Amino acid sequence: MRTKKIGFIGCGAIADKMAQTIHNLPNMACYAVTSRNPERAEAFARKWNFTKTYDSCEALADDPEIDLVYIATPHTLHYEQTRLCLKKKKAVLCEKPFTVNARQAEELFALSEQEDVFVSEALWTRFMPLSVKMQELLADEHAIGIPQMLTANLGYTLTHKERIIKPELAGGALLDVGIYTLNLAAMVFGSEPQAIHSVCTKTDSGVDAQENITLLYPNGKIAALQSSIMATTDRMGVISGSKGYLIIENINNPERIRLLNKQYETVETFEAPRQITGLEYELYASLRAIEEHKIETIEMPHKETLRIMRQMDSLRKEWNIVYPADQ
């Protein structure tokens, strides 16, 4: 199999994690990188043995050797950089949130279809083996029966990070950590909620600091979600059904799922397989889709990215949180 050459736009912490992943995978190579800071790009290239560095996104996207561009820049740059790559016929795996709002995502997916070029949101949890196992268990009527209720939380102390606090960088808890709880609810219940109720607190800079979101689904199903950039939470998810419940340890990067019955007894435990970083699964899925001449992955189809973006737009509107890109 020919080695797949990956181009990077951005070289921050998550890009470092992706480079580590590729460095340990067969038939993949860290090939080219660009950054707003040329010195940082050069240092990053030396650290991970990149073949090339470029002084602009456009120059990188013009390289015919690149099989997939990984975008790992602040939220507000995702739209512009993804659009550039798609117009250059370059496949893109873009970090979450895919864009700042649904309007931007709709435009990019339309462009992807028009140009017949692959693009996906790198929402890593969607690609994880235990996320697949969770959906298999939910589909098995003998496991927990019909899922009726979900509670989930995700919180980290992140207020020291500039991109998290500044409205002009599309900061706040929702787009950075709340997106994971909303995606979990979408994976569990599938259908669109009939109603969403929420409250949030804000930072002094005006972005959301913590929120409590309740989603009401058809047939009375409920998801209660919490996210925070002010507190470190237990990251637990509990899916309760008519015959038992599932406990997901770390909804961000699932480490273990426990299946319990109505007597609160553990029936079975499912452990996550050993991983490099956890980012390998979205890489595999993206490159597989490209090989199959598809413009999206099965695990994170465009319609699911749009579903979550629209929910986040609606929540921010309710909280009166507006970013420059919304104007």
Image (cartoon, rainbow, N blue to C red):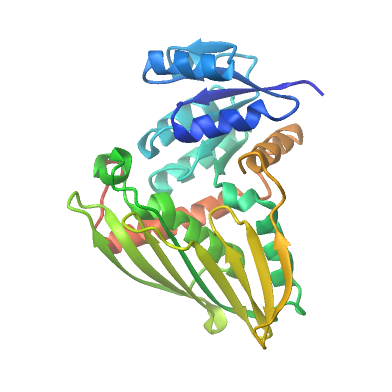
Q: Position of residue 131 (x, y in %)?
A: 65, 58
Q: Residue at 56% across / 54% down in the picture? A: 304
Q: Quadrant of residue 77?
A: top left
Asked whether, in this view, residue 187 is left or right of residue 307, the answer is right
Q: Pinpoint residue 13: horizontal percent, then vertical percent.
A: 45, 33
Quarter the C terminus occupies: top left
Q: Nearer the viewer, residue 71 or 134?
A: 134
Viewer-proximal residue among 192 and 141: 141
Instruction: Mark yes or no: residue 271 visible.
Output: yes
Q: Quadrant of residue 138?
A: bottom right
Residue at the limit of the structure toward the right, as seen here: 1
Q: Residue at x 61, y 40 (%)?
A: 277
Q: How many marks?
A: 0
Q: Position of residue 296 (x, y in %)?
A: 64, 42
* Residue 45 location (% of width, % of height): 52, 16
- Residue at horizontal 60%, vertical 63%? 187
Q: Is residue 89 above or below residue 107?
A: above
Whether residue 13 is situated above or below residue 35 in the rendered picture: below
Question: Which of the 4 image quadrants contains residue 275?
Answer: top right
- Answer left or right for 238 relative to 261: left
Is 265 placed above or below 273 here?
Answer: below
Q: Residue furthest bottom?
A: 263
Front position in the image: 26 or 182: 26
Which residue is drawn at the image coordinates 67% and 88% (left, top)?
263
Q: Is residue 295 visible?
A: no
Tell me the quadrant of the picture where the N terminus can be found. top right
